Amino acid sequence: MQYTGAEIIIKCLREQGTDTVFGYPGGTILNVYDALYKYESEIKHILTSHEQGAAHAADGYARATGRVGVCLATSGPGATNLVTGIATAYMDSIPVVAITCNVILPLLGKDSFQEIDIAGVTMPITKHSFIVKDVKSLADTIRKAFEIAKSGRPGPVLVDVTKDVTAALYDYKKITPVIESPRNTYTQDQIDKAAALISKAKKPFIYLGGGAIISDAADEVKEFAEKINAPVCDTLMGKGAFDGKSDLYTGMIGMHGTKASNLGVSDCDLLIALGARFSDRVVGNVKKFAAKAKIIHIDIDAAEINKNVITHAEIVGDLKEILTKLNTVITPKTHPEWIAHIKDLKTKFPLNYNRENLSCPYVIEEIYRMTDGDAIITTDVGQHQMWASQYYKFSKPRTFLSSGGLGTMGYGLGACIGAKSGRPEKICINIAGDGCFRMNMNELATAGRYNIPIIQIIINNHVLGMVRQWQTLFYEKRYSQTILDDKVDFTLVAKGLGCEAFRVTQKEEFAPAFEKALALGAPVVIECIIPQDDKVFPMVPAGAPISEAFDEKDLH
């Protein structure tokens, strides 16, 4: 049977299991939105306030569900407004398909109204970018986009479709997607080499990254860590892949990692990197990173091997499958002295903060207590992001959604809407600083329009907190353009955009406000006023060895 190209797009989305899309209509994509109107019972569309919000919502949906997120935008500025969200997904290996429409084929390349080469613009920040100029190739291109987005190391794919293709008629026949097994290239010799290094190690340490979340390897990681009796640290992207309450867990590694993790990794004799990419925020000074250790790197992307840190053994492939094989090969180990040393580091260097005033760590701990650690937490980027990763004990995968690689301010609110859309049964909370919140707070109107019951926490210190922290520590307190002490009233803004709102200035006010937010079943903003010079510790200066992590006590 023949359908318009627009209808073929919708049918291909349903074919791929898509139940929700996020977007914003416009001239060139009108045919697609007309088809959405006809098929509204099959696909839910969330109209965001801005295309960037749609891209972040698709990203949050993907991170929370493990499925491919989808966003739609029109040509020109609609398409370019997706770029930051696409780049965010690319840096964190998140499967997103962005569908844009362009001017009709005869007008391409003529600087037509709202024409932009969005496939060219996004080429460096996607796994692949397509432009469809013939309706005959449309369905297969959509299918290929989903396959590319979710296969191997996931990532975003862009499909740009000319408007005349969306109007053209062509045959469509449903094809059920085939789930292909990962194409692994490792050998048994590599498995055996890694197992031999693990067997000889006296002081092993596991460094856990986002690949453990992507491959759904949490159970295998737990078995592996307990079998080899090794402490575990994680990256921002790896939160929840290992239980944050486990005795083997030492906290995050890197610039704002715990001293136990940073000192432990610096002293270990074997570092086992699972689905991690040795980013500069983790490694610090490359020459002095884990200098006493041999390094095993397991990752699905061969390009990551020896890119940042030279390894002694590597296995390229799906982490879940590789750990399953390793767990059958290795024999149980015990390292009582090493584990006792790590436990001593955890006791000697606990995370700590000023408990006299209302603070972000206090808010995070209260959220953890009142949700029983069973919420999906999204964040923006900055001090609040680090505090959330430090003080909320994540124990399950896909419960901490944050922009790691790109560090996108304004990410969290859209992502929270996407997460709640994909997992409506979960409590979904976005934590943002006042600087980040300003960037995309218009998405509160989206939450209000659909009555999406998310909770938005604003950690308001009236400054760009993380930048100010650097200015205090490294720029002799020259606070250039980081003070936000103006007349903006976030509670009035929230109410004006259709949400309930509370302001909290004292510790004892937070729990009652949060309890009300949980009970309302509606979008709620809680603004928390904290001191402007609260700082995130520990901290490693950029480019310094992670063993030189310092905290507030070290400054005196």
Image (cartoon, rainbow, N blue to C red):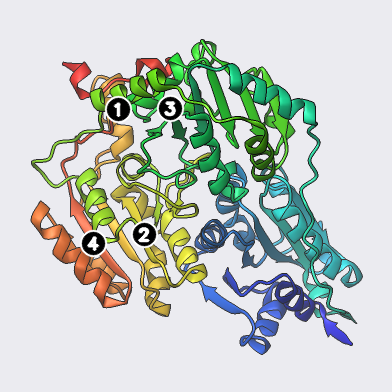
Q: Mark 1 points at which residue?
A: 346
Amino acid carrying label 2: it is: Asp
Q: Are the residues at dot 4 and dot 2 in contact (C-beta closer than 8 Å)? A: no
Nearer the observer: mark 3 or 1; the answer is 1
Q: Residue 230 carries which label?
A: none
Inter-mark Cα distance, 1 to 4: 33 Å
Residue 302 x %, y %? 74, 32
Inter-mark Cα distance, 3 to 1: 16 Å
Inter-mark Cα distance, 2 to 3: 26 Å
Judge whether 38 appears above or below 246 on screen: below
Q: Mark 2 points at which residue?
A: 374
Q: Residue at position x 49%, y 70% from top?
A: 421
Q: Earlier in the sequence, mark 2 or mark 3?
A: 3
Q: Residue at position x 73%, y 39% from top?
A: 317
Q: Name the residue under label 3.
A: 254
Element type where label 2 sits in the image = loop
Amino acid carrying label 3: it is: Gly
Judge left or right: residue 357 versus residue 434: left
